[in-house]
Image (spheres, rainbow, N blue to C red):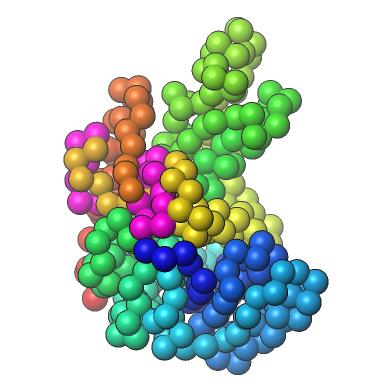
Amino acid sequence: MPMTSRIAIVGAGHVGATVAYALMLRGLFAEIVLIDQSPAHAEAEATDIADANAMAPPVRIWSGDYRDAGDADILVVTAGATPKEGEARTAVAGRSAAIVRDCIRKAMDAGFDGVIVVASNPADAMAQVAQAASGLPPERVLGTGTLLDSNRFRKRIADRLGVAPGAVAAMVLGEHGDSEVVAYSTVRIGGMNLDAYLDEQAFDRAGAAHDVIRAGYTVSEGKGYTSFGVASAILRICEAIHRDERVVLPVSSLLAGQYGIDGVYLSLPCLIGSAGILRVLTPELTDEEQTALSASADVLRETLRQTEEDL
């Protein structure tokens, strides 16, 4: 697959516009096209970002349509239904699925043949909807999954230990949502597991895990939506694809027997390159974490069932 020069973002709302702005600042792509159900809104966002580009590496930014997406190497899908205050992400699955299917089918009709990154709520189920609608191999359709949650986990551990987040390796697995698995078995600080690093110091694991799981709700309650965190996760995934980095990130992919789970999208650490997901990894988890991961898969299966009922 050739190096990416054009990226198309479907949905110019808070997340889509923030992704476009972050991509422009990074200068990763020669072309960024914004597509939205409101062309006037997409045009305004594209113009605003293009004006800011005068102080950044040159990038062509414009509002377009699905014909422009057909020539893109990466398609980022942020369009979908927005949860109301206090509403779980999974509650909007049916409404989001209809939107995502429509977007994907229009992109495919336009000739899109690259990698799809899905951030629409609920991200895991919508990645699975997108893959089915696209007909692309599962490795070329991935969801943002728990990459943001894992970053939140690393940040909260770092804050409590008084170290930099970059010094902490830690992953959240499973659903990007209430059933996600905050996997303490994956935590490493300088190669040491958490217990060894703490050396019998107190650490509120349950409290930190609760903060991670509730973080999105806390942000949404304060400002009405989330944008910067998820946009940064999307940017990181697109960068890994663009540069063929072959880096490991916890993203949502279609499982095929890992931990006895099959046929459902959820997050495990994945090796990512220009062709999408190159390999799904299976870290050694505790029995409790594996049980929680299976329960998370059941939640996602139920979410998918609801999207089918809403058709």
Q: Main secondary structure of the magenta part?
A: strand
* In magenta stretch: residue 292: no
* In magenta stretch: residue 266: yes
Q: Quadrant of the N terminus?
A: bottom left
Q: Quadrant of the C terminus?
A: bottom left
Residue that extends furthest to the front in the rendered view of this protein: 2
Give the residues drawn in magenta, as a range. 259-277
Q: Residue at x 61, y 7 (%)?
A: 199
Name the residue nearer the viewer: 43 or 295.
43
* Depicted 242 relative to depicted 249: above or below: below
- The answer to whether 299 appears left or right of 69 in the picture is left
Q: Count the labels in the image.
A: 0
- The answer to whether 50 appears left or right of 141 in the picture is right
Residue that extends furthest to the right in the rendered view of this protein: 55
Name the residue nearer the viewer: 43 or 264.
43
**Which quadrant of the view contains residue 67?**
bottom left
Q: Residue at x 24, y 61 (%)?
A: 137
Name the residue nearer the viewer: 21 or 211.
21
- The answer to whether 209 appears left or right of 27 in the picture is left
- The answer to whether 139 appears left or right of 7 in the picture is left
* Depicted 255 relative to depicted 91: above or below: above
Residue that extends furthest to the top in the rendered view of this protein: 200
Q: Residue at x 35, y 25 (%)?
A: 285
Name the residue nearer the viewer: 265 or 112.
112
Answer whether residue 106 is visible to the viewer in this image. Answer: no
In the image, residue 20 lies at what x, y percent? 61, 71
In the image, residue 232 lies at what x, y percent? 60, 56
Q: Residue at x 55, y 16 (%)?
A: 192
Answer whether residue 119 is visible to the viewer in this image. Answer: yes
**Which quadrant of the view contains residue 270?**
top left
**Which quadrant of the view contains residue 210?**
top right
In the image, residue 291 lies at what x, y percent? 29, 30
